[in-house]
Image: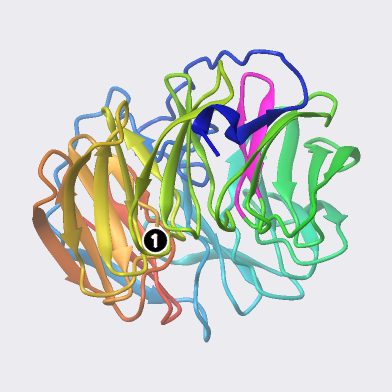
Amino acid sequence: MTAKHLFKAAAAAAVIIAAASAACAQDWPTFKNNALRTGANQEGNYPVQRFSGRREWTAVKASQAIASSPAAYKGKFYFGTNDGDFCAVDAAGNDLWRFKAENWITTSPAVLNGRVYFGSYDSRLYCLDAETGGLIWRFTTHSGVQSSPATDGDTVYFGSNDGFVYAVSIKTGWQRWSFKTDAAVTGSPVVADGVVYVGNKNCKMFAIDAATGKLKWRAIVGGPIMSAPAVANGMLYFTSQDGKLYCARLKHQAVIWRYDAKAQIESSPLVHNGRVIFGDISGKVTAVDANSGAELWKVDTGASVFSSAAALGDKIYIGSNSDSLYELDAGSGSVSWSVPLDGDVVAAPAVTAERIIAVTSGGSVCSIR
């Protein structure tokens, strides 16, 4: 099947992507930092502090693993644990509050306008007061929620293991619409210019009208899509467990290139300064040209990489099952430093202008400067 015919249109509407406004460099308010899931901190007006790889503090927050990529907002950090606790800590790692869900929390939170949103294996999406941890509302699906929520400021979008994609009012928690796919939806959606993009375990990428929940088009690839796509410069980038990174031009709803990593990919792609960067379970971190898909560099961490990469300026930050977090040079892939932690780093770090926040399978949250 050619790339031209890979995308099956259910509607002929073209999609034009507008640039997402950058978050404040002091914040990292959602998975991969922004609604387009590019994974880069655009630095705002703050001077960039180059990190040395020094652990500022480590705080044990769970008896089980932490696989929830943290969010940073107004000097506070938010994350879930496999104990079922959702935690807020201050800049020194001290507990501010905890909220108890009824099962694991592996989703990454989204923080917006004084509220924090996250999902749990207990089948619910929660909305809490970001200052107090008080429950505002909760929405129940028919199975566990592994999909990290995305919001456009009015609606929260997320998937569930029940195979549905949901749109819920951020104010009331009432359902606006649901879209039925044919398999579990574990990856986080992207919301761009009125379209929700999200993949599922049955090898499909969906484009759904954000207002109506109607299918616009879908793509079929060679393996389950467990990760979040990213949108940049009119392109949709996404990975699959078939070991490939795909790039589709949204205007034409057509794949224009694919890169074969020759290893299963679980991480979501980082798109930054003309490069797409991702890790795979063979332990490699790879950068390719965002326009052509040509390989630029590849580095071996020595253990599986489930963590998605994050960027600040010309540096890349990514975790590995080598119990380490790495800083890489975006241009060459050379390792600037690695810092040993107390367990696997499977969740993407939050990278602000002041510090990096990473979580581990040992149940710890760590600040690195």
Look at the image and say whether residue 189 sits in the magenta stretch: yes
Amino acid identity at mark 1: Ser
Query: Residue 24 occupies which quadrant of the picture?
Result: top left
Residue at image mark 1: 307
Residue 84 percent coordinates (x, y)? 66, 75
What secondary structure do most residues of the magenta stretch adopt? strand
Residue sitting at x 85%, y 26%: 212
Snapshot colouring:
rainbow
Mark 1: few, some, or many residues within 10 Å (few <14, many ≥20)?
many
Residue 221 percent coordinates (x, y)? 57, 47
Residue sitting at x 34%, y 60%: 262
Residue sitting at x 77%, y 26%: 10
Residue sitting at x 56%, y 15%: 251
Which residues are drawn in magenta?
187-199
Residue found farthest to the front? 1
Residue 205 percent coordinates (x, y)? 63, 42
Q: Nearer the viewer, residue 139 or 275?
A: 275
